[in-house]
Amino acid sequence: MNKWIEKSIKLAKSEFYLDKLLEIYPPEEISREKQVERESPILKRLFQEKNCKKLLRELIRLKKIGFKFPIENPYISFLSYYEDAIDKNPETIKKICEKLFEMSYDELKDRLEAPKKASRRTGPMFKLWLRSKFNFIDVNEFRRAKGIVFLNGGDKFLKEYAKSELKCKFKELSKGLDFIARVKNKYIIGTAKFITDIGGSQSNQFIEALSLIKETKCSENIIKIAIIDGAPWLNEKEKNEFCFSALNYPL
């Protein structure tokens, strides 16, 4: 078994494992730090007028800039990617708007501004923790900086850098990266996930993390890693992949 996997399994079953993870992944919900009426002065009017299509388009716009969509509905993502479908599917839009108009405007506003669940913020949480341990460098200085350094940038920027500068080839649906580090002439690219359960969408996150290692093609001076914490270490079956707990990093 890969020594880092073995160490991570032992670590997960040892004392204070979860207590130590609190530093990296605090369970508190994260404020969106956004006020809906500042971002959308027309929202209240659209809601009061029950202007269904315009209201839905405005809610989708707000969703794209970081607000929470106020109801759970399986068709919202489709409509977000293809807004022309709003005009082409009147029964679906009617059902969505009926649900929206069951609440008051104040309730709608509160739901839009609701904090993000901690489980959906593990990447940013991990980056904040990394920043407390290592230096983050802008792209112009990244190649010249000494010691262990991390590249500044969001997940999409980091993935594009890995493609253009490091010549990595990702699978078609691969998501962004959580970090790129440089240690002397070696580069480390990776993802970080705190997975709270076994099975379902949580298992998909684990598979997604490992696919970065298995399917991304990089040159020999680039190390691909998945930093995983939580429930998977209680039922780990991968033997040879380069993944480990954040509490057990080998840098």
Image (spheres, grey):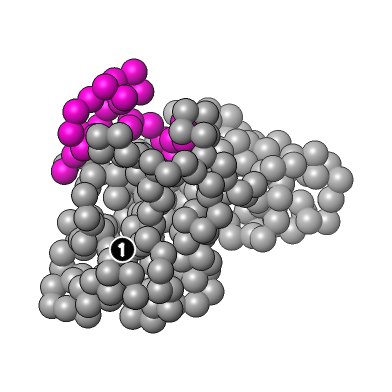
Which residue does the image show at 20% across and 73% down from the upper left?
11
User: Is 92 on the left or on the right of 20, as rendered?
Assistant: right
Which residue does the image show at 37% across and 61% down from the upper left?
242
> What residue type is disc 1 on?
Phe
Element class at badge 1: strand
Q: Quadrant of the N terminus?
A: bottom left
Task: Identify the residue at the far right of this view.
Answer: 88
Q: Is residue 56 visible?
A: no
The verdict on residue 148 being magenta is yes
Query: In the image shown, does 214 or 107 lie closer to the viewer?
Result: 214
Mark 1 crowdedness (10 Å alpha carbons): few <14, some 14-19, many ≥20 = many
Query: In the image shown, does 103 or 165 lie closer to the viewer?
Result: 165
Bounds of the magenta segment: 133-162
- Identify whether 59 is placed above or below 14: above
- Identify whether 91 is placed above or below 55: below
Give percent across and percent down for residue 181: 31, 39
Give percent across and percent down for residue 88: 86, 45
User: Is 146 on the left or on the right of 70, as rendered?
Assistant: left
According to the picture, the residue beneath numbered tag 1 turns out to be 244
